[in-house]
Amino acid sequence: MIKVNKEGQVWVFAEQHLGKIEDTSLELMGRARELANKLGVQVGAVLLGSSVKNAADMLVHYGADTVYMGEHPLLEHYQTSSYSKILYDVIQKYEPQIMLFGATPVGRDLAPHVASAVKAGLTADCTDLQIGRHEIKKTGEVYDNLLFQIRPAFGGNIIATIINYDRWPQMATVREGVMPMPEPDGRRKGGIVEIKVSLSHADLVVEILDEHRRDKTVNLKASRIIVAGGAGVGSRENFRLIWDLANCLGAVPGASRAAVDLGFIDRDHQVGQTGTTVRPSLYIAAGISGAVQHQAGMSDSKKIIAINNDPDAPIFNVAHYKIVGDLNEVIPAMIKAIKEKV
Ligand code: FAD
């Protein structure tokens, strides 16, 4: 366990693939900057890879004051043992007070290894991070400037705020898409601290022979308009209605988890707590009841249109425009009206 260092930086593990920083890490840079400003400390990013200098400069543009960069040919591919060992060493040396990871497959593997090595706590899958004050009622002890690690709990029925006042660094993984992407500033200047990395094949327990990466088939986050269908659409064949309306609007089709589980559409289209978090200009939800887990991924959309034949469906609580009716009649009417306009 490292000692409490109130001057410690706010750190982000900057995940990269072939030198390109993952979006989640860049999103985290924005929130790290805000947290650090509140604490009056600096932002650090830890970047490991085989040839990542350009990515280091990018992290400075996205808000890093210092990039701790470790370059080595054997760091080209993520491996738990090498990456967690290096992170353990740099945390011991520089004592950040907060360490953040994206809740990506890599972050979800790396963060618990590092947390257990440095004997700190870890909150997984946060949807918000704030700085706050906590008083333990029984003893009257007050802790200022703690990281509030906020995430849905008990199946999404409550939002829990988790703190970690006696184990440092305070560590969390954060879900993709929940923090807005900051604007890069090409004029920003920052420092690069090179981490000495000495690794040999003997240090790696896994030998990577070949890599196959499956990229998502759809980019929901980048879409300005999403037309999402739920279990109420009824079948994979009927989901054609959702695709047709989406095509008419230049939108991307989204889905509830129930629609995905029922095989109406591929999982890459799922919106919500265990899918993608989106905030498009327009979100059309058809045949979706609006469970909290679905709302967690779309309620920040600028305008929401809900189509549901149940006037009491919870989706109407977050919708700006409410259409009570059968989607099998409403969607064709919408498509007809749009086609007549253009
Ligand atoms: P339903 O709840 O079955 O709703 C169908 C709706 O369609 C109803 O409101 C009905 O009135 C309406 N309808 C039926 N026929 C028509 C018609 N002809 N015209 C108009 N309306 C019609 N869910 C997600 O979406 N995303 C997640 O990421 C997610 N993560 C989860 C994580 C956890 C840990 C858990 C426990 C659950 C999660 N869920 C998630 C599931 C969530 O709780 C709901 O079960 C799911 O969102 C329901 O999907 P739905 O609204 O499509 O289906």
Image: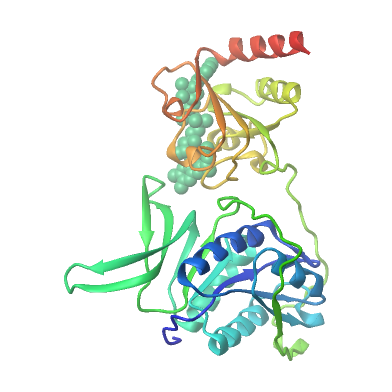
Above or below, comparing residue 199 to residue 238 in the picture: below
Res. 134 image quadrant: bottom left
* Point 67% across, 41% down: residue: 220
Left-right relation of 216 to 235: right
Residue 26 locus on image (x, y percent)? 66, 60
Residue 94 figure quarter? bottom right
Question: On the picture, is 310 further left or further right than 44?
Answer: left
Of 195 and 9, which appears nearest the observer?
Answer: 9
**Residue at 66 percent of width and 69 percent of height:** 14
Point out residue 124 in the picture as x, y percentages from the top left corner.
48, 62
The image's colour scheme reads rainbow
The N terminus: image quadrant: bottom left
Q: Check the image and name the residue furthest to the left.
A: 138
* Residue under the image location 19 percent in, 67 percent down: 137
- The percent position of residue 260, horizontal first and vertical second, equals 60, 36
- In the image, is residue 56 above or below residue 302? below
Where 275 sits versus 176, above or below? above
Q: Is residue 204 above or below residue 296?
A: below
* Residue pictured at 49% horizontal, 42% vertical: 296
Tell me the quarter of the image containing the C terminus.
Answer: top right
Number of on-image labels? 0
Coordinates of residue 275 in the picture (x, y in percent): 58, 45
Q: Nearer the viewer, residue 55 or 268?
A: 55
**Residue lying at the far front of the rendered structure:** 187
